[in-house]
């Protein structure tokens, strides 16, 4: 049979341009010529932009080595395949947190337990290793947990019921060596959550009401345990004392370290990416691929002050304790209930007058901020600045601002005076170093692994809305916006991500925890799904289905192709990428010889089997 003349490569390429990506891959198996054409870079560039619907102004990921591999990364390395469902909790699961090594994770639930899970079992499954109930400490439920930096201690935050319903919470520290309770710290309001500052110290909150609409938030540094040899040394120290107006309070504290701000895992500024590549080429790397970031091919308490009215301070918040169908609500705090239910005539004027008086008092009794506190972060590469981030507000009780306050080196331990550095009577409050207004109700925050970017879930207010009554915030959108804030420039990067939704009204809004990995960001939602976006391309890549609200998601820090999601359906779902699922299902390959002698023996026996017809298997045994 005569050979059929081959089609020109240009014609084959033109045909492939009209095929979907899976058809191109199958066609590439036909012959060597078609295989070579099916890997054409210009072809996969077109397939990439058309399939993922990405604007062509967005450049390729700075660490990508080819368009084909980049297409494959987004298609094959997303943790979107459900591989296991954990059902050990008996009520809504509210929060998930991985250890820094990724070998364990913790879960918090409305069943008032915190559970620890092992992720390194030989069979690849996840198993429960410990469960602690907090009922004995009069907790209503556990709501948040966090491992310290060396994974030896676990911070657990919960809602403390007390003698009657209140806004108070509590933080417990559990040793991960023997699961003993080391300490308990008061935390008020409970949606401050709390966080680790370093391996042995954690941050909690307290709240004091000055008037009906004015309060003072105090943030405390607490040692996680009391050493026997240091029983006379302080275990608490006041960090900051901040005035709140218009019924707002400080909530959701977290710590960011800026040591890697100049060398982030992923630089989201496209223009800066181009400049970095140009600088690398000028430095003599024109002929060598120098990814900016990483190789995509790898595997990836204060006691109440004297004179405070304890009964009023612990009064039940508006709406009482959150119902079982709710989650971790953002509080309308206790002393305001009588304002909401009380006087109608002249109440707005009274609130406005109190706010004006509070602002005047704040102006004259607040310590001035240091203009250089947030400037030149990491410019010399040696200074490791630490920031405290939290939600706050100034117009209404719903959190709509991100507050930033630098923690100085002498504030990193509880040594020194309990109330911190001495201050004059004119410096009663601490000022914020920076405030970012989100113009919406903030319902979640998460830091990128390098602490360069802050991701914020919010539900937007109507454009150009005016707030005349702090107790009547604007209506909030059902769509959840995921904002991206650069903590180096302190500005919002690009447009916000959007796909997930929420439906609860303003006064019932609750926290939806999100998580950020090297390449992806994920979030829960009230529409019974979790969502995954690519951080560089700003596109939604996957929806993770549950049968109820998804409260929390968590990437493994050891492998971003492993993701967990927690839901009101009382389950934790384990998701892995299609690539990892295939690897787990493929038959194991024979082990290679580990030394030269074994390699030579194996080669010799194979030759005997070929030339001498001796029946010997691959291990060299007859």
Image (cartoon, rainbow, N blue to C red):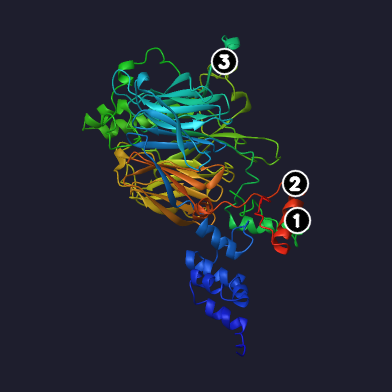
Instruction: Estimate the x, y position of residue 442 in percent, counting from the top left.
Output: 40, 42
Instruction: Estimate the x, y position of residue 566 in percent, counting from the top left.
Output: 39, 41
The circle drawn on residue 595 is 2
Residue at label 1? 604
Circle 2: element type: loop
Asked whether residue 439 appears in the rendered view, the answer is no
- Give the residue displayed 75% in from the left and 51% down from the top: 601
- Give the residue displayed 78% in from the left and 58% down from the top: 284
Up-down: is 256 above or below 158?
Answer: below
Up-down: is 520 above or below 93?
Answer: below
State the image quarter where residue 143 is shown: top left
Cα–Cα gap, marks 1 and 3: 77 Å
Cα–Cα gap, marks 1 and 2: 15 Å
State the image quarter where residue 358 is shown: top left
**Left or right, 387 with reference to 91:** right
Instruction: Estimate the x, y position of residue 8 in percent, counting from the top left.
Output: 61, 84
Asked whether residue 613 appears in the rendered view, the answer is yes
The circle drawn on residue 377 is none
Choose mark 3 or mark 2, whichever is in front. 2
Instruction: Estimate the x, y position of residue 443 in percent, counting from the top left.
Output: 39, 41
């Amino acid at each position: 049979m005569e050979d059929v003349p081959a089609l020109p490569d240009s014609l084959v390429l033109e045909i492939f341009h009209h095929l979907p990506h899976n058809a191109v891959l199958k066609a590439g198996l036909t012959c060597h010529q078609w295989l070579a054409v099916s890997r054409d870079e210009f072809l996969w560039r077109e397939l990439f932009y058309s399939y993922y619907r990405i604007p062509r102004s967005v450049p390729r990921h700075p660490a990508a080595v080819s368009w084909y591999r980049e297409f494959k990364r987004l298609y094959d390395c997303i943790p979107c395949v459900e591989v296991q469902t954990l059902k050990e909790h008996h009520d809504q699961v509210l929060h998930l947190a991985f250890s820094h090594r990724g070998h364990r994770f913790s879960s918090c639930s409305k069943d008032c337990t915190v559970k620890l899970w092992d992720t390194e079992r030989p069979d690849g499954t996840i198993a429960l290793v410990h469960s602690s109930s907090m009922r004995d400490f009069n907790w209503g439920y556990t709501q948040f947990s966090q491992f310290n930096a060396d994974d030896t201690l676990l911070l657990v935050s919960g809602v403390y019921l007390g003698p009657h319903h209140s806004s108070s919470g509590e933080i417990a520290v559990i040793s991960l060596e023997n699961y003993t309770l080391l300490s308990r710290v008061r935390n008020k309001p409970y949606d401050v959550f709390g966080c680790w500052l370093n391996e042995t110290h954690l941050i909690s909150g307290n709240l004091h009401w000055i008037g009906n609409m004015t309060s003072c938030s105090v943030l405390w540094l607490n040692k996680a345990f009391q050493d026997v040899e240091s029983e006379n040394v302080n275990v608490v120290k006041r960090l900051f004392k901040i005035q709140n107006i218009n019924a707002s309070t400080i909530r959701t504290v977290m710590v960011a370290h800026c040591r890697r701000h100049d060398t982030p895992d992923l630089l989201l500024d496209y223009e800066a990416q181009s400049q970095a590549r140009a600088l690398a080429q000028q430095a003599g790397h024109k002929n060598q691929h120098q990814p900016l970031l990483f190789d995509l091919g790898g595997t990836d308490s204060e006691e109440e002050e004297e004179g405070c009215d304890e009964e009023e301070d612990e009064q039940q918040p508006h709406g009482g304790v959150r119902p079982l169908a709710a989650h971790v609500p953002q509080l309308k705090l206790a002393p305001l209930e009588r304002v909401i239910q009380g006087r109608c005539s002249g109440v707005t004027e009274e609130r406005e007058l109190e706010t004006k008086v509070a602002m005047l008092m704040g102006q004259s009794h607040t310590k001035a901020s240091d203009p250089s506190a947030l400037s030149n972060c990491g410019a010399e590469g040696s200074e490791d600045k630490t920031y405290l981030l939290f939600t706050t507000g100034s117009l209404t009780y719903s959190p709509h601002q991100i507050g930033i306050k630098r923690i100085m080196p002498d504030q990193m331990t509880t040594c020194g005076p309990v109330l911190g550095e001495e201050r004059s009577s004119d410096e009663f409050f601490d000022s914020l170093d920076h405030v970012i207004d989100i113009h919406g109700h903030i319902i979640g925050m998460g830091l990128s692994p390098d602490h360069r970017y802050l991701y914020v879930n919010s539900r937007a207010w109507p454009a150009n809305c005016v707030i005349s009554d702090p107790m009547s915030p604007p209506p909030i959108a059902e769509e959840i916006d995921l904002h991206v804030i650069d903590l180096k420039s302190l500005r919002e990067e690009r447009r916000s991500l959007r796909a997930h939704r929420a439906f609860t009204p303003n006064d019932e809004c609750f926290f939806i925890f999100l998580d950020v990995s090297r390449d992806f960001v994920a979030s829960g939602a009230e529409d019974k799904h979790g969502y995954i976006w690519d951080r560089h391309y700003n596109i939604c890549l996957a929806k993770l289905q549950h049968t109820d609200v998804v409260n929390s998601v968590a990437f493994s820090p050891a492998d971003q192709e492993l993701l967990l999601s927690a839901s009101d359906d009382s389950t934790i779902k384990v998701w892995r990428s299609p690539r990892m699922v295939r690897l787990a299902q493929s038959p194991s390959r024979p082990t290679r010889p580990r030394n030269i002698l074994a390699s030579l023996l194996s080669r010799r026996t194979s030759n005997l089997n070929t030339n001498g017809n001796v029946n010997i298997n691959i291990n060299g045994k007859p």
